[in-house]
Image (spheres, grey):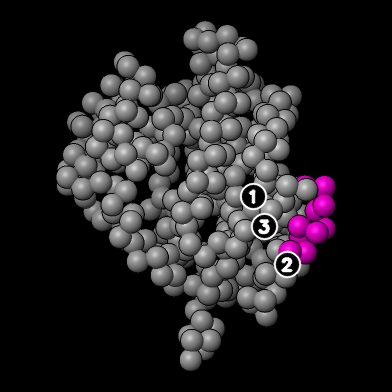
C-alpha cells in the first residue's frame, strides 16, 4: 500500500551541497542519463547580468538540458523564497507533462527545503517602518551589529543566517516584532512530509579540500572579470542595498570599487565569507531529513561519484 501511494506522488529529484563541491557538472550528466529538466535552486542565479559572481551555468555547459529559474529577473528585483516555491509548484507538473523528470539543483537551503516539504509560510504581515529602521541600523553600525540583534531574540535563526544576509535577518526580526514568535520556531513546526516521491542527494567533501576549491573558484572569478561585472552593475544604478548586491562577490567588490577597502582586503574578505557560507550550507542540509549523502572528496573520480548517484536514482525511480 505504501509503495502504491509513493508511486502516485510526482517524482522529484534534488541535488544539494555547498558551493564549489561540483554540483553543476554532475547535474548535467545525470540530466542526460535520466531525461531531466533542471530547476535552479539558487537564489542569486535568477538575476540577469550577474553571471560570474553567481557561478552561473553557461549555455554551453547546459549541453541542451532545459534549465529553469535562471536569468528571470533584473538585479533590482526582490526575489523571495515564496516566489521560488510558487514557481516550482507550477514547473514540476509542467515538466512531468513533457515526460521529463524534474531536477532541482542548488545550494539555497531554505528555498530547496520549502519545495521538498511544501512549507506553509504564515502571513505575519509587514512593517515597512520597522524594516527601514533595521536596514538603517545595519548601515550605521555594520552587518554584525544587526546580526547580534537577531541573536538576542532568535539564536537558532542567527546560527543559520550569515551576518551579510541582511534581508533574511531583517525578516526574522520583523516576524518576531510583529508576532512575538521566532522564525526558527515557525520552521521547526513545518510538517516535513513531502508531497513528492522525493530523492534528495547531498554532495559532501573533506572540509579543507572544499575550502581550497572555494578559493580556486574565487581566483577564477576574478580572472573571468568579476570586478568588471560588479562595476557595470553599479554604473547602471543597481544600489548596494538591493538583495542581489548582498550576494557573495558583489558586496565585497563593490566596497573595493567605492574605496572602502583595499583590493587585498576585499579578496580576503570574499574568500573568508565564502568559506563560512559553505560551512553554513552544510549545516543547513545536515538538519534536513531524507538526504542521501555522497562523499565526493576524490573529485578526480568523477565516474565513480556519478555511478554512486546514478545507482540511487535508479533504485528510487525505476
Disc 1 or 3, which lies upstream in sequence?
1
Which is nearer the eye, 56 or 109?
A: 109
Residue at figure coordinates x 65%, y 25% from the top left? 226
- Classify 10 Å Cα crowding around label 2: few (below 14), some (14-19), many (20 and above): some
Mark 2 and mark 1: Cα distance apart in space: 16 Å
Q: Which mark is residue 101?
A: none
Residue at figure coordinates x 70%, y 32% from the top left? 212
Image depth: mark 2 or mark 3 in front: 3
Residue at figure coordinates x 35%, y 42% from the top left? 157
Residue 295 percent across, percent down from the top left: 69, 53
In the image, residue 161 sits, relative to residue 288, either above or below, namely above
Q: Which mark is residue 294?
A: 3
Disc 2 or 1, which lies upstream in sequence?
1
Which is nearer the eye, 94 or 203?
A: 203
Q: Which residues are magenta?
A: 299-308
Residue 59 counted in the magenta span: no
Disc 2 or 3, which lies upstream in sequence?
3
User: Can residue 88 be seen here?
Assistant: yes
Q: Quadrant of the C terminus?
A: bottom right
Relative placement, left or right, of 185 versus 162 is left
User: Can residue 242 be seen here?
Assistant: no
Q: Which residue is mark 1?
A: 204
Relative placement, left or right, of 19 versus 118 is right
Relative placement, left or right, of 228 versus 284 is right
Q: Which residue is mark 2?
A: 310
Figure disc tally? 3
Amino acid at each position: 500500500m505504501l509503495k502504491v501511494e509513493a508511486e502516485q506522488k510526482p517524482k522529484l529529484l534534488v541535488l544539494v551541497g555547498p558551493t564549489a563541491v561540483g554540483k553543476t557538472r554532475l547535474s548535467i550528466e545525470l540530466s542526460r542519463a535520466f531525461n531531466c529538466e533542471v530547476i535552479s535552486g539558487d537564489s542569486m542565479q535568477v538575476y540577469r547580468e550577474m553571471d560570474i559572481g553567481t557561478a552561473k551555468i553557461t549555455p554551453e555547459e547546459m549541453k541542451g538540458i532545459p534549465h529553469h529559474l535562471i536569468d528571470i529577473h533584473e538585479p533590482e528585483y526582490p526575489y523571495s523564497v515564496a516566489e521560488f516555491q510558487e514557481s516550482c509548484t507550477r514547473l514540476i507538473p509542467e515538466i512531468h507533462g513533457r515526460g521529463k523528470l524534474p531536477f532541482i539543483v542548488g545550494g539555497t537551503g531554505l528555498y530547496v527545503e520549502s519545495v521538498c516539504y511544501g512549507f506553509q509560510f504564515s502571513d505575519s504581515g509587514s512593517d515597512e517602518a520597522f524594516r527601514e529602521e533595521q536596514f538603517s541600523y545595519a548601515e550605521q553600525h555594520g552587518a554584525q551589529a544587526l546580526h547580534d540583534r537577531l541573536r538576542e531574540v532568535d539564536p537558532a535563526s542567527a546560527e543559520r543566517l550569515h551576518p551579510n544576509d541582511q534581508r533574511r535577518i531583517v525578516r526574522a526580526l520583523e516576524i518576531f516584532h510583529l508576532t512575538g514568535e521566532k522564525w526558527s520556531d515557525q520552521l521547526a513546526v513545518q510538517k516535513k512530509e513531502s508531497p513528492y516521491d522525493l530523492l534528495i542527494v547531498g554532495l559532501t567533501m573533506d572540509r579543507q579540500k572544499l575550502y581550497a576549491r572555494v578559493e580556486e573558484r574565487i581566483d577564477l572569478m576574478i580572472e573571468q572579470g568579476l570586478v568588471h561585472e560588479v562595476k557595470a552593475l553599479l554604473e547602471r544604478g543597481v544600489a548596494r542595498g538591493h538583495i542581489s548586491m548582498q550576494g557573495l562577490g558583489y558586496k565585497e567588490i563593490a566596497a573595493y570599487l567605492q574605496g572602502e577597502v583595499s583590493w587585498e582586503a576585499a579578496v580576503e574578505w570574499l574568500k573568508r565569507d565564502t568559506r563560512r557560507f559553505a560551512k553554513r550550507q552544510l549545516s543547513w542540509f545536515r538538519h534536513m531529513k531524507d538526504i542521501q549523502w555522497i562523499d565526493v572528496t576524490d573529485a578526480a573520480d568523477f565516474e565513480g561519484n556519478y555511478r554512486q548517484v546514478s545507482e540511487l536514482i535508479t533504485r528510487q525511480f525505476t
